[in-house]
Amino acid sequence: MAHHHILARARRRLARFASRFTRAEQGATAVEFALVFMPFLMLIFAMIELGLVFLVSLLLENAIIDVGRTIRTGELQTTGGTAATFKTAVCNKIGAIGSTSCASALQLDVRTYADYSTSSTSGLATATVPTTMQWNPGTSGSIVLIRAYYTWPLVTPLLQTGLQNANGRRIIYAATAFTNEPYEP
């Protein structure tokens, strides 16, 4: 009989504690904040990272256009510039955001074509990374296509599922095409 009495008293205490716990509102704000904080934080980090991807994309595009001018004017060809000096100039134009890993993350493909229709129909003017890169800045009057591929690591898991091209990284692509200006070799 004493055993039933102890069990009944324990049940009553448990019921009182449970009803008091469900009626308590003092920690409700803290619990709600804890439930919302992590998704909110992930969303903030995803927005920051997406902004960085767009920023690097714009920086890469501007760098290719600006440094590509050295090929278009013949400056690079007449001063003995190489693929390495061109790549270094592009990395310097990208600036602090990409400078730490730019040398290993950037791939450049510089090709010449007989005419503009050949360059667009050859399948080379797409954002797929070619297996072999070329370095052919051409001569005076050459039609040149410069393509740059920058591998940007994604940190936010939310963006890795939607933006990644390969192994948690985003391939950022930029290109420019032009006809080299007349210059003396």
Image: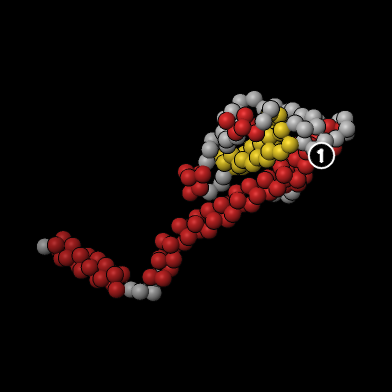
Q: Is residue 38 left or right of residue 26?
A: right
Residue drawn at 45 percent across, 57 percent down? 39
40 to 164, vertically: above or below? below
Amino acid tagged 1: Thr
The residue sitting at the top extreme is: 132
Residue drawn at 69 percent across, 27 percent down? 114
Could you tell me which secondary element the residue under label 1 belongs to? loop
36 to 111, vertically: above or below? below
Q: Is residue 60 left or right of residue 161?
A: right
Where residue 51 appears, as percent x and y from the top left, is 59, 54
Report if residue 172 is visible in the image: yes
Where residue 184 appears, as percent x and y from the top left, is 88, 32
Where residue 167 appears, as percent x and y from the top left, is 53, 36
182 to 156, vertically: above or below? above
Residue drawn at 68 percent across, 40 percent down? 176
43 to 167, vertically: above or below? below
Where residue 11 appears, as percent x and y from the top left, is 20, 65
Q: Nearer the viewer, residue 107 or 181?
A: 181
In the rendered view of the protein, which quadrant contains the C terminus? top right
Residue drawn at 58 percent across, 37 percent down? 127
Residue denoted by label 1: 73
Q: Is residue 96 left or right of residue 46?
A: right
